[in-house]
Every structure is written in C-alpha cells, then in structure tokens.
Image (tube, coloured by chain):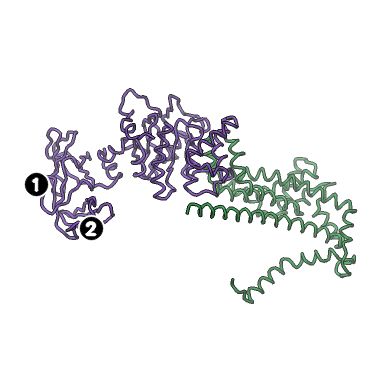
Amino acid sequence: MERWSRFNIASVVLGFGFLYLPIVLLVIFSFNESKLVTVWAGFSTKWYAQLWHNQSLLDAAWVTIRVALISATCATVLGTLAALALVRYTRFRGRVLFSGMVYAPLVMPEVITGLSLLLLFVAIGFDRGFWTITLAHITFTMCFVAVVVQSRLLSFDQSIEEAALDLGATPVRTFFAITLPVIAPAVFSGWVLAFTLSLDDLVISSFTTGPGATTLPMKIYSQVRLGVTPEINAICTILIGIVALGVVIASIVTKRREVQRERDERAAFAAIG
Amino acid sequence: MKSLGSIRRSFAPWADPASKPFISVKNVTKKFGDFTAVDDLSLNIYTREFFALLGASGCGKSTLLRMLAGFEQPTSGEIILDGQNLAGIPPYRRPVNMMFQSYALFPHMTVENNVAFGLKQDGMAKADIAGRVAQMLKLVKLEKFAKRKPHQLSGGQRQRVALARSLAKRPKVLLLDEPLGALDKKLREETQFELMDLQQQLGLTFVVVTHDQEEAMTMADRIAVMSHGQVVQVATPAEIYEAPNSRFVADFIGDVNIFDGAVTSTEEGRVQIETTGGISVRLASPEKFANGAKAAVAIRPEKIRISRQAPAHAPTNAAEGEIWDIGYLGDMTVFHIRLKDGKVIKASSLNAVRAVEDPLGYDQQVWISFGEDAGVVLKD
C-alpha cells in the first residue's frame, strides 16, 4: 500500500469539501429545530413531518415523478433506436450529419432548447402543461441515452446476431432474444440517466410548462425566491437520498457482476490449465 | 468404430460425371463498392464432402461462405443448394448452419440454451428439444457443462459449444469459418481429427474456410485454393500438393523450389527443359510443350536428394552447389544450398536415424539431384 503524502491528502480534502460541503450543510439544516435557516437551534425532524401536509409540494412531486417515468421510458426507446441506427448502418448518406444532430442537444444551452420547444408548441397550438413538459424532456434526454447505448454497441460482437439469424430467428426475434438482453445493462443505465435528468430539470420545464403543471424543481425554485425554509431543505435532503441510493445500488450491481465474471473466468481457466 | 480410411479413399463423387452436385456456385460475383471480393466464381460441392476454401486473407473465401449462409447476396450469378436457388432467401430460412470464427455464443444464455436456440426457433416440442440438446452435448463431450454460461468455459469448450449449436438443427450443410483458428496448436490438431470423425459419423456436407494449409490438407476431401476472388485450383490435397496447376498454387501450398526455363525438346511423356541457371531438367509430364516455350519447374524440398558425389544421371536433373544454411527441425533437417548461379534452393532430409556419422556441414560442396517424377512442369 502506498503512503499518502500530505499534498495528496490536502487535495482530496479540498476537492471533496468543494463538492460536498454545501450539500452537507443543507442536510444538517434540514434537521434544524429553528425556522431560521442560518441559526442552529437543536435537532428535529418536524420539517419532514410537515412536508406530508404541504399538498402543493406533494402535487409537484407527483407531477415530477410521472414526467420522469414517462419521458425516461420514451427517451430510452428512441435513444436506443438512434444508437442502433448509428452503429449498424454505417454506410447511409448523411450519417455524420445525423450523428452530429443526435448529439447536439448534449451541448446545446438549455435556454435555447427550452425556448425553441416553447416556440414550437405555440406555433402548432399545443396546449402547454404536463404533456409539453414530458415531450420536452424526451427531446433532451434522448441523446444521453443514445450516447450510453452507442458506446455499448461499439463493443458488441455482431456475429452473435448473425448466429441467431443463422439458427432460424427472424430479425425481430433476434433483436428481442439476443440484442436487447445483451445490451440491457446499458439501456438500463440510459434510462436511469434520463430519469434523473428529467427529475431535476428546471430550465426546460419552466419554458414548456403551462397552468396546472408545476414540477418539484420549479416549486422549490419559486419558494426559495420567497426565502429558504427548512421545509425546502428537508425535501432536498430526501431527493439527495433517493439519488444517492440509486447510484450506490447501480454501482454495487455492476461491481458484483464484474467480480463474479472474473471469478468464473479464472475458475474456467484453472480447470483446463 | 470402423476405420474410415477405405471409405475416404473411394469417396470421389467429383470424378463421376453422373453424380449431381449438392451445392452449385455458378458465376458468382460479389462487389463491395469498387472492390470485387468474389469474381465470377463457379464450383461444385458434393453431398458428404468435406470441402475447404483455402486462401490468404482478403481472397474472398469468407465472402463466399457468407453468401452461402445468406448474410451477403451475390451481385450476380446464382447459388443452388439441393436443387433450390438460394437467391433472396434470408439466412433464417436456409437449410444451412454456420459455425463462426468468434464462436458467437450468446453470452446471456447457458450452454444448454445456446444449443437449444435454433430448435426453439423451429417450434420443436420441449421434450424433443431436451433430448436433442443432451445428444448434442454428449457428441461434443460437454454434458457436465450444460448449465454453465459461455464465459465460464475455456476456449476449447466454447469451440465445442459452437459446434454443437450449429449441428443441433441437423443442417444439410455446415459452414465453418476458421473453426480452429482460436485454438492452440495441440488442441487444434486433436480437434481436426474430431471434426473429421464427426463429419463422417453424421454424414453431413462440411464447407470450411481456412487460411491454414495444414488444416485444409488434413481435413478436406477437396480443397479450393482461392486468390483475388477466384478459384485457382480445386483438387484433392494430394493433387494440390503434388500436381499444382500454377506457380501460385505450387508456391502457396508448402515449400517449393521453382526454376524458370525453356523447353528444349518433348518426347512421349517426357519433357526436357533448360533452366536459366543452366541445369538441364528432364521430367515426366503428360502435357505437350512447343520447343522454346517458357516453362517453370517446381520441385518440393523433400524430393531433392543431397549427395557428396555426382549422381549417375548427371548432368541431367543434377547440379552442384554448397551448403549455405542448415535448419535442424528434429524430425527433419532443411538445407539451403547455393547453386553455381547464386540461386539458393531448399532441400530437406528426414532424420531417420538418431546420429549420422559424418553429417553434412556448412560450406560443404555437394550435388543435388532429383528423379524424373519429382517435379512438376508449370506453364508460365
């Protein structure tokens, strides 16, 4: 084991402090007894209890979750199809343009995406509300899914699809029986990514929303403008908890699978060696 | 099991004009853009034949195999299998199966399910599938590994799963793309004989693509030597080796010494050639040549004798030289001998006894010689 130099320790502490100090403060103050955000007055969970009585906050949370579920699912389907098209059909005309266009939203300022979507919805007379937010979220999360799935497909051995065709499976069956199960982990990560992006989006939602459809980030933002309340701290802490749990579970699952695979391979080679 | 030697020797449907080919490739051309991968190629493959497509990479052998499997469509020409034109028939409706070079096992399925996959596509009854899978796994000696996933197997085991999977549907033709390419030398040699036995047992037609000439020579009934999208020669391994029809085949298969020269005289069954290096060669040849015609003589290293004294028939079929290099391989020794004109030829001799009293050494003056049946005359 290497010894840690002072310089290394200092840089790790600084880096992590920079990243997590604000979040830690937020979590600590969510358990503050006092209504004053900056004054510590003892430990309490009363703000969490109060959350359950704040109907408008709960409504916003429900809208957010529904938008995230629907948009992540649609974006996963579209993004996976786009990735397949980009990786498989390398010979079609305008492929470079097409792939550039799929990835452009990754770097497009959100304000521009939001504004252009708003203009589109106004132009075609689409009533703004829940569905316009959902559509907007599908649009901007799709490219993230495409990137994740495409990177998996690049290392995919296409001869296994040919083997399935050769053994009598139609192209459609081949996709569902072979391709999809093999790339499923990437598709799932794409879905999780789309879900979390949708969950915390503020800018695009604000542009495309209409009366009666307020997402949680919008709600939080509007309340913060009136002053930060410990209640907001509490709901943010819950959100952090959910996201952290998701990340931890995902990484444990991946790690376990890797370890298991390595062990199996070693066993197989030991058996013949 | 009965020895297969006698069956193999008498198996020669290609020599019988009455027998009908099982697979007929007729004037097939395949182009990828400007590149012609297969160029107006025709060949016939017969039932129960073990047929090898041999060539360097990029010669079009894999493309031809992929056209048989249905992954590529010919640009022109047609492929007939058992009387059926395969044009437009997708891979999943062809009565052929393929074993892939990478094995292409389904990583998320157990060995069992890999083997059963093709049978399930046919809608076979569950009990029948289980029976057939068990039978196939027994055939490749993998019964104990039925529940394993591909990544839990060694390379050789994966190869056998791929084989079992491609044989499970009892295809009329099995296509094998470099089937032993990923195995180490020893395992490869064992597996060659296993494949031959399996093919005989099951009575199937095998078409194998390989770049390994030893593999093709060992396993195949006939070999098609390919180059630049065309078949250069189709013949049995012995014919390919002993009677190559061109300089390319002579050079591609095994080691060979080629002497360029011109015909000086022809008589009944014999041809006399004066090489550019000044050796006068007299060889048996069924073909007639015009006097003065350019010709080349191809002689395999093992058919060249080395002696200290001039042979009786000198100067015909003999030349003087000195030993330039010696390569000791254990079973035989390869000598590089520099002739008077500077040409270096290869001659090999079998080490039949363990120690020779007075072995040939470097720089020694020797005579090389060969018999009238030792070489082949190639038209240039």
- Type of amino acid under label 2: Asp
Which is more toward the observer, B44 or A100? B44
What is the residue that sits farthest to the bottom in this orientation? A6
The answer, for residue A151, to whether it is visible in the render is: yes
Residue depicted at x 45% and y 37%: B66
The color chain A is rendered in: green
Residue depicted at x 57% and y 46%: B149
User: Which x, y percent locates residue A116?
Assistant: 72, 48
Label 1 – label 2 distance at C-alpha: 26 Å
User: Which x, y percent locates residue B326?
Assistant: 23, 57
Kindly indicate the quadrant of the structure image that contains residue A23: bottom right
The color chain B is rendered in: purple
Which is more toward the observer, B275 or B118? B118
Which is more toward the observer, B222 or B163? B163
Judging by the rendered image, the residue that carries numbered circle 2 is B325
Judging by the rendered image, the residue that carries numbered circle 1 is B312
Q: Is residue A194 left or right of residue B69?
A: right
